[in-house]
């Protein structure tokens, strides 16, 4: 490593990637928020239309799995352009679709573009050769969170979602520079892609799955817990926004403030802080603030874990595909299972979430032990890693 700063032009794809992450988050966050408006527009029954979000997420899951399985065999730049076109075309198609079934088809297409792009963005910025990889990947996730917050706000302000989808589709096409990311990143010069260590990859997949259950579980069930212990629905909704704000702030502040900590130690300390904050939510009067602090502590966990996994394991696109699929599965399954046990027992929610956070910590300890046993070592985060891009 030379210690040279990246050339000014090298930051253009990074800026494009961060801007694209905002747009991806805006569409992802807007679809669920717009369902009541879409039901009215398309004449759907009350409670109907949830298949739109399901198909969008299904498209993402298929694309992430497909790109991971095809790692090393799929073309780089053409694939990225195809994914960007799918997202942009799908978003614009949803904005202009005259029928519900066509809207759902375009949602599947847009979801595939979203999933593939998320995989490639994460794979590129998680490279060990990237300067301050952990910080950049946390900023990427913070940008997605900002977009996911902005999307519903704009839908509520405008009273419709078509304008947001159309504008987002057009703007995403202007970010074609972001399609340069990940082209050839982490691939061997010749021969087949190496296979990552199965036990270590399995532990990281467990960490991704369980962590997703914690993050999505708080987002989905915090208001249920708070109303169950006496807070008003309006106050509970505002407290949930505080958690998401803490999560976004944590992704910006924690990696910068703790840039000299080794990644497993940083993740472990964040999880320990989150466990304490979740335990504090059992005290009803401080629960809203405690959930916000939990978000602050959790923010850096998953992006930093991605960087750590990419430093330890070969075939980064395959590794990230496994971790992102596990993350999606955990987001869907674990909050649902916790919710089944919650009626009549609101304390079950923070207790279950705290238990999952401790399980994440155990997975980090096992991953660190396996890494030491295999002789793999992760570089300490810092500015000295020289950027390697394919542009």
Image (cartoon, rainbow, N blue to C red):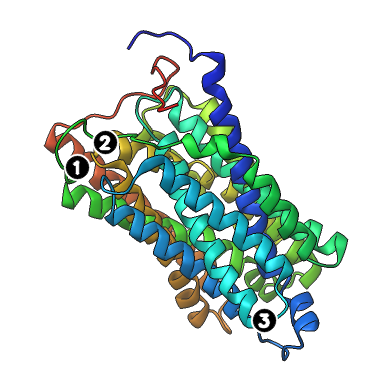
Residue beneath disc 1: 193
Quarter in which the N terminus is drawn: top left
Q: Earlier in the sequence, mark 2 or mark 3?
A: 3
**From what the image shows, is residue 110 above or below residue 102?**
above
Q: Are marks 2 and 1 in contact (CB under 8 Å)?
A: yes
- Residue 268 in view here: no
Q: What residue sits right under mark 3 in the picture? A: 100
| Contact, mark 3 vs mark 1 (Cβ under 8 Å) | no
Residue 186 is left or right of residue 137, and the answer is left
Q: Is residue 62 above or below residue 122?
A: below
Query: In which quadrant of the rendered view does residue 133 lie?
Result: top left
Q: Residue at x 77, y 65 (%)?
A: 161
Q: Secondary structure at mark 2?
A: loop
Asked if labels 3 and 2 touch by Cβ distance under 8 angstroms, the answer is no
Crowding at dot 2, Cα within 10 Å, few <14 / some 14-19 / many 20+, comes out as some
From the image, tell me which residue sits under label 2.
187
| Residue at 65 percent of width and 40 percent of height | 174
């Amino acid at each position: 490593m030379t210690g040279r700063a990246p050339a000014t032009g090298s930051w253009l794809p990074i800026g494009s990637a961060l801007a694209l992450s905002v747009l991806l988050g805006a569409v992802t966050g807007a679809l669920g928020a717009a369902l009541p408006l879409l039901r009215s527009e398309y004449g759907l029954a009350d409670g109907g239309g949830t298949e739109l979000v399901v198909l969008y997420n299904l498209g993402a899951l298929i694309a992430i799995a497909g790109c991971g399985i095809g790692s090393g065999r799929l073309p780089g730049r053409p694939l990225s352009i195809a994914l960007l076109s799918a997202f942009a075309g799908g978003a614009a198609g949803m904005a202009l679709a005259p029928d519900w079934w066509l809207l759902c088809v375009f949602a599947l297409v847009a979801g595939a573009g979203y999933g593939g792009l998320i995989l490639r963005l994460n794979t590129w910025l998680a490279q060990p050769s990237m300067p301050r990889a952990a910080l950049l990947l946390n900023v990427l996730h913070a940008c997605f969170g900002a977009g996911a917050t902005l999307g519903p706000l704009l839908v509520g302000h405008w009273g419709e979602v078509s304008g947001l989808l159309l504008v987002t589709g057009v703007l995403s096409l202007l970010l074609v520079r972001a399609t340069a990311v990940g082209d050839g990143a982490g691939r061997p010069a010749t021969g087949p892609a190496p296979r990552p260590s199965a036990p270590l990859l399995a532990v990281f997949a467990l960490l991704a799955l369980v962590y997703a259950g914690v993050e999505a579980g708080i987002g989905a069930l915090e208001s249920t817990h708070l109303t169950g212990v006496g807070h008003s629905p309006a106050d509970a909704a505002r407290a949930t926004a505080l958690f998401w704000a803490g999560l976004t702030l944590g992704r910006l502040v924690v990696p910068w403030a703790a840039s000299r900590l080794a990644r497993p130690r940083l993740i472990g300390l964040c999880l320990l802080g989150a466990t304490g904050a979740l335990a504090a939510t059992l005290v009803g009067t401080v629960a809203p603030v405690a959930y916000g602090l939990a978000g602050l502590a959790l923010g850096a966990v998953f992006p930093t874990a991605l960087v750590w996994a990419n430093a330890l394991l070969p075939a980064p696109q395959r590794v990230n595909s496994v971790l992102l699929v596990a993350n999606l599965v955990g987001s869907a399954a674990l909050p649902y299972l916790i919710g089944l046990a919650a009626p009549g027992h609101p304390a079950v929610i923070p207790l279950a979430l705290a238990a999952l956070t401790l399980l994440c910590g155990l997975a980090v300890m096992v991953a660190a032990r396996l890494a030491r046993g295999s002789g793999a070592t992760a570089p300490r985060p810092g500015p000295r890693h020289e950027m390697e891009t394919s542009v």
